[in-house]
Image: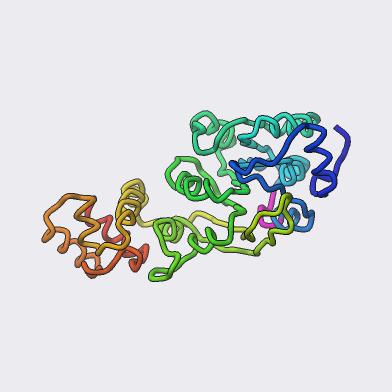
Amino acid sequence: MEEINICSPRQINKILEDFCLHPHKKWGQNFLADNNIVNKILTEVDLKQNERIIEIGPGLGALTLPMVKKSAFVLAIEIDSGLVCFLKRLMEAYENICILEDDIRKVDTSSIKHFLEEEGKPVKIVANLPYYITSPFVYRLFEEEICWEKAVLMMQKEMAFKLQASPGSYYYNSLSVLCSYFTHIRTPFNVSSSVFYPAPQVDSTLVVMEPKENRELINLEKEYIKLVSEVFRYRRKTMVNSLSYYLNWDRSLIKKFLLEAEIDPQQRPDSISYEKFANLCRLIYN
């Protein structure tokens, strides 16, 4: 395929017409249409030659093509069969890309693990995430046994607030706790809805996450995820009640563990720091 400007709104329209494509609302498809934003995202990805990248929702390839041109090995996972056909045409001259038609919420991690870790090095993850898959995708980052060194994620601004929220704040939830425990997280810049085609109704934020080293619960992390997730199912209840529903233990024993973890039994889950959840996890499961 001849060289094209994938980030030009006019060119995007032409591609959609030529390939009989259209953005699907059910998949939250909004294509990046600004080269400046593409370059800013790539700066955050900080590509090195021969690095391995997993890209979720490549769309029309606005990020995929420059990453491939920089000699990164890219595994692009796209749910839309029409976009997969277009991407294969766009990338036909390159051998350092694999395009997988699948739903990231259902894809079998073991089937792609060999590609990602073939060189024994951690991978980088790049994604433009629709609102409806952001939470399950971030959970999978923590639950799956894939070694990754950085995740560069475009998401709705409200979801970025939730990932960075502090205890006691309006947006604080289970993902806030898990992100604080597992990662160093930052938001380099916001992105106006006007740089997407079609323009969504809300602005976005670029979120960059890097795993923390020497995490204190390295052998109890599955239990930690389960504990935090279950307790936040009852976020309006007190901690003693939330744990009672989850563990089905005697309340006096639950109060004992909470006090040992320096948690007031009458506190609510949305006021507890990730460190105190870690203390509680260690007491319960050790």
Q: Is residue 212 above or below residue 127?
A: below
Q: Position of residue 233 (x, y in %)?
A: 32, 54
Q: Main secondary structure of the magenta part?
A: helix
Q: Which residue sits at x=65%, y=37%?
A: 76
Please state the extent of the stretch shown in magenta in the rendering. 43-47
- The answer to whether residue 268 is left or right of residue 49 is left
Residue 35, image quadrant = bottom right
Residue 213, position as x, y percentages in the image: 46, 56
Q: Vertical placement of 272 versus 104: above or below?
A: below
Q: Give yes or no for residue 15 being in the magenta stretch.
A: no
In the rendered image, residue 243, in percent from the top left (x then y), is placed at: 23, 56
Q: Residue at x 73, y 50 (%)?
A: 197
Residue 44 drawn in magenta? yes
Is residue 214 visible to us here? no
Q: Is residue 144 above or below residue 268?
A: above
Residue furthest to the right in view is 2
Image point 72% across, 42% down: which residue?
64
What's the residue at 73%, 59% (across, down)?
Answer: 194
